[in-house]
Image (spheres, grey):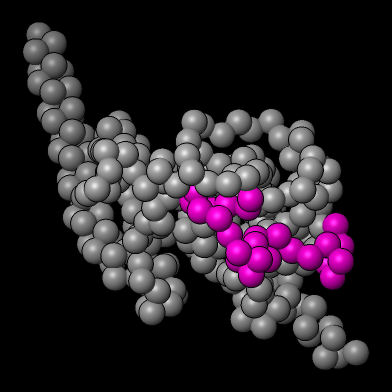
């Protein structure tokens, strides 16, 4: 009884930590391949780019994804290619072994609309399931052969490697994001967490400071707590170094603007004195 109670307590603690990281991720903006949107305490919508239009093959005028998509069959596909049965098994959980693990709202009732060239995913940690799951919310046919329009099939959670070891090792939010981006985006990016610095630089001064600081915090978590053996780990470190410098510069810009504003107001006050 005590062992079971301790295990349940530990699982709740892990889930709460996961939800905390989910909330942090939902507050961020400025990634190149995905955009998170927090929806409630247990849900996060993740918009992931389908095709990296900025990437060009040296052989073709368009990207590899365009070539593959135009020639792919009607079978199950990821990144425009055809999946084998083993890869297909990784995407959808077995309904026989796990039952219908439905999200809080079915995909047919999803109000969020993904942008062009994007796929929408739902990442959630519902207390009733005691662990996180991920569901495809749009473009089901692009990623998996769902075998029809059965809503229960469409709302079957994805069977991700990053979530498979939840019970024994736990799962970090960025591990799930990395796997979803790698599965969805064509060609798979070397660094799923690449930043869209042009977007960050375009933000108003104060917002730019806050956004860059929040991104620094998130990337630091990946560097400190993530697996250094991951191929993207060293690239995240490089991005973090550049982002640190940008954040410091943004802080200086804000401080300089405040000082100039105070000086201007002081000058106006002196001019207004008799």
Residue 186, position as x, y percentages in the image? 42, 50
For the question of whether residue 244 can be seen, the reply is: no
In this view of the protein, which residue sits in the foreground, 87 or 213? 87
Q: Residue at x 34, y 61 (%)?
A: 190
In this view of the protein, which residue sits in the foreground, 16 or 100? 100
The magenta stretch is: 75-100
Q: Residue at x 40, y 43 (%)?
A: 67
In this view of the protein, which residue sits in the foreground, 91 or 224? 91
Corner quadrant of residue 51: top left
Residue 139, position as x, y percentages in the image? 62, 40
Corner quadrant of residue 148: top right
Q: Residue at x 82, y 91 (%)?
A: 3
How many badges with numbers are in the image?
A: 0
In this view of the protein, which residue sits in the foreground, 127 or 234? 234
Is residue 271 on the magenta stretch? no
In which quadrant is the N terminus drawn?
A: bottom right
**In the visual, does 191 lie left or right of 14?**
left
Residue 8, position as x, y percentages in the image? 80, 78
Instruction: Check the image and report above or below for 82 versus 16.
Output: above
Q: Residue at x 57, y 52 (%)?
A: 77
**In the visual, does 21 lie left or right of 146?**
left
**In the visual, does 42 lie left or right of 191?**
right
Instruction: Check the image and report above or below for 12 versus 267.
Output: below
Residue 10, position as x, y percentages in the image? 72, 79
For the question of whether residue 240 can be seen, the reply is: yes
Is residue 92 on the magenta stretch? yes
Corner quadrant of residue 172: bottom right
Residue located farthest toward the right when viewing the structure as drawn: 1
In which quadrant is the C terminus drawn?
A: top left
């Amino acid at each position: 009884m005590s062992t079971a109670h301790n295990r349940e307590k530990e699982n709740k603690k892990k889930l709460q930590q996961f939800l905390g990281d989910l909330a942090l991720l939902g507050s961020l903006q400025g990634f190149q391949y995905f955009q998170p949107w927090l929806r409630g305490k247990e849900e996060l919508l993740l918009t992931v780019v389908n095709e990296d239009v900025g990437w060009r093959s040296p052989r073709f005028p368009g990207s590899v994804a365009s070539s593959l998509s135009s020639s792919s069959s009607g079978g199950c596909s990821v990144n425009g290619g055809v999946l084998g049965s083993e890869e297909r098994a990784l995407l959808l959980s077995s309904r026989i072994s796990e039952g219908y693990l439905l999200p809080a709202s079915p995909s047919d009732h999803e109000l969020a609309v993904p942008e062009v060239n994007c796929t929408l995913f739902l990442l959630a940690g519902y207390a009733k399931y005691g662990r996180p799951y991920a569901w495809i919310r749009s473009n089901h046919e692009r990623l998996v052969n769902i075998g029809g329009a059965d809503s229960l099939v469409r709302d079957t959670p994805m069977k991700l490697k990053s979530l498979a070891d939840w019970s024994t090792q736990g799962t970090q939010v960025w591990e799930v994001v990395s796997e979803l981006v790698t599965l969805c985006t064509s060609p798979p990016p070397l660094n799923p967490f690449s930043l869209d610095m042009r977007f960050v630089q375009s933000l108003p001064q104060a917002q730019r400071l806050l956004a860059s600081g929040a991104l620094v915090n998130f990337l630091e978590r990946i560097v400190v707590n993530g697996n250094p053996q991951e191929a993207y780990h060293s690239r995240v470190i490089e991005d973090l170094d550049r982002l640190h410098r940008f954040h410091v510069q943004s802080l200086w810009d804000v401080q300089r603007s405040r000082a100039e504003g105070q000086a201007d107001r002081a000058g106006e006050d002196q001019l207004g004195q008799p």
